[in-house]
Amino acid sequence: MSLEEIAKEVRRDIMRTAYKGGSGHIASALSAVEIMTALYFGGILRYDPANPYWEDRDKLVLSKGHASLVLYSVLKRIGYITQKELDSFCSPGSALGGEPRLGDIPGVEATTGSLGHGLSFAIGIAIANRLDKRSSRTYAILGDGECQEGSVWEAALSAAHYRLDNLTVILDCNSLQAMDSTENIVSLNPLMEKWNGFGWSVVEINGHDLDQICTALKEDRESAITKPRIIIAHTIKGKGISFMENVPIWHYRMPNSEEMGIVRRDLGLDDL
């Protein structure tokens, strides 16, 4: 199965899971589908499907934890959780809550959801790997809205200070947050220059172009640059569902019956 086909299946799983659970930040998960597909199925992230707790695995921190639907869908595909567990999303007693929690299921490397803290957690992992002389890399997926948090920039300074060349951030830059555009709420521009100024190596890509994502991640992994890296991935919030794309109101909302008909058409779903 090609990466494009996997991405389509992940989108379908996101929508099926949200529909059954009656909850979830669908649009935020959809913008990160290609990023997660490239990491897990594009030969980037080192992990062992038969041994989720392999000590030398690479670790991914989903700092924008409200997008947990994309993480859970990917973890199901690699066998870390079952379809039955995925179907229990947001049900009483389920291990799969709206935000991922460390210790509940394999593949969740940090408790996230309170925005602005995931990068600090990832930095701690990267420093620990260095002290333990492990070759593992640490990846963190941030949202652009959470970059309005001061804690992100304190962490960015710290990573640059310690020259954490085993740390890569992928910024899911969809230009929207809960109520409006990031530009209208608190402008982040010029974003590339800011990260550069904080001592990071920075590249910009189309966050839905799997070739671009895989190329950037492979070049990043092979780079000899001795500083932390960030890939600014420009994405579309709600990508793949026509009425959700670039519409702020879909930050946290479920489609009604009429809208679900459009979802079925857009995603080629015949089982909802």
Image (cartoon, rainbow, N blue to C red):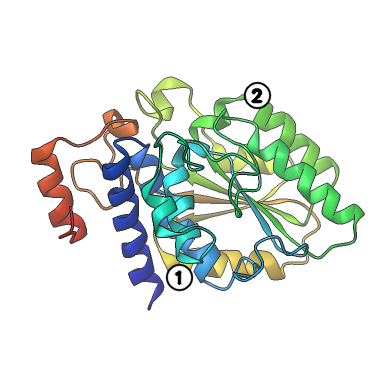
Picture disc at residue 150: 2
User: Does 172 sit above or below residue 151?
Assistant: below
Picture disc at residue 77: none
Mark 1 → mark 2, Cα distance in angstroms: 33 Å
Q: Residue at horizontal 37%, vertical 63%?
A: 7
Q: Name the residue under label 1.
A: 211
Image quadrant in which you'd find residue 27: top left
90 on left or right of 158: left
Count of number-bearing discs:
2
User: Does 152 sit above or below residue 213?
Assistant: above
63 on left or right of 53: left
User: Does 228 sit above or below residue 118?
Assistant: below
Could you say where residue 69 lies in the image, as x and y percent from the top left?
42, 46
Q: Residue at horizontal 10%, vertical 47%?
A: 261
In front here: 23 or 170?
Answer: 23
Image quadrant in which you'd find residue 24: top left
Badge 1: how crowded within 10 Å, few (<14), some, or many (20+)?
Answer: some
Image quadrant in which you'd find residue 62: top right
